[in-house]
């Protein structure tokens, strides 16, 4: 995923909220594939003059391997005038609901375990999410008021997405 593009989109949302100002305090949820992308984007955002300023933006990381105490921070509302940005893996797709999310940025990719019959090994690969996952991600925005979702893939790519993610048990031979 182009983390520079994601950072620029986050910066645009922070700098230019909805004309009525209603969404100026809504959180931004960014779906990334894994810890590497989360840390790359986090480094870019922290280096930014506005996104790295804790008086203007609070940046939180969410990954399944993080301690529960750290994960709880994502539910806290920031002070008025401070935008919350949560960078997460697909853990935020169904397992967690962050009520104040107004904006979702969906790169359309996910890390999943796939079995290679030639090598008889399973490996963690980056793949396109399913249409169901895409709808789930979109639904994370606007839980308590109107929301916005930015899909960072074309409608042609969306047409190629599988309807549902194949359950892992079906991917592994017996």
Image (cartoon, rainbow, N blue to C red):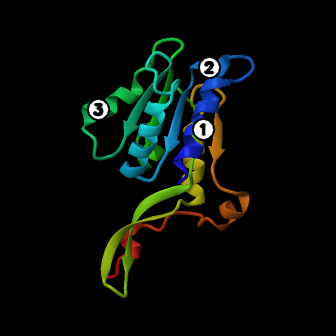
- Point out residue 143 in the picture as x, y percentages from the top left corner: 57, 31
Q: Residues within 10 Å of mark 3 (few under 14, many from 20)?
A: few
Dot 2 and dot 1 residues touching (CB under 8 Å): no
Residue 166: percent from left, percent from top: 47, 68
In this rendering, position of residue 67 left or right of residue 141? left
Foreground tag (1 vs 3): 1
Q: Which residue is mark 1?
A: 8
> Element under label 1?
helix
Badge 2 density bin: few <14, some 14–19, many ≥20, Cα 10 Å = some
Q: Are marks 1 and 3 in contact (CB under 8 Å)?
A: no
The image's mark for residue 24 is 2
Do we see residue 73 in this rendering? yes
Q: Say whether residue 43 is left or right of residue 161.
A: left
User: Which residue is at a point 53% across and 24% down the rendered structure image?
Assistant: 50
Which residue matches tag 3? 70
Q: Is residue 98 visible?
A: no
Q: How many marks?
A: 3
The front one of 154 and 75 is 154
Which residue is pictured at 46% across the width and 42% down the height? 41
Instruction: Where is residue 67? Give x, y as percent.
Output: 24, 38
């Amino acid at each position: 995923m182009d983390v520079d593009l994601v950072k620029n989109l986050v910066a645009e949302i922070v700098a230019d909220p909805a004309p009525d100002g209603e969404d100026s305090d809504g959180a931004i949820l960014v779906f990334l594939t894994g810890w590497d992308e989360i840390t790359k984007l986090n480094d870019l955002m922290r280096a930014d003059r506005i996104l790295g300023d804790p008086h203007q933006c609070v940046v939180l990381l969410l990954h399944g391997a993080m301690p529960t105490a750290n994960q709880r921070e994502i539910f806290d509302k920031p002070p008025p005038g401070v935008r919350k940005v949560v960078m997460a893996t697909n853990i935020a797709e169904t397992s967690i609901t962050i009520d104040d999310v107004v904006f979702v940025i969906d790169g359309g990719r996910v890390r999943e375990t796939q079995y290679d019959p030639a090598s008889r090994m399973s490996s963690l690969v980056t793949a396109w999410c399913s249409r169901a996952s895409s709808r789930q991600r979109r639904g994370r925005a606007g839980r308590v008021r109107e929301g916005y979702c930015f899909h960072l893939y074309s409608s042609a790519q969306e047409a190629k997405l599988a309807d549902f993610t194949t359950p892992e048990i079906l991917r592994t031979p017996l």
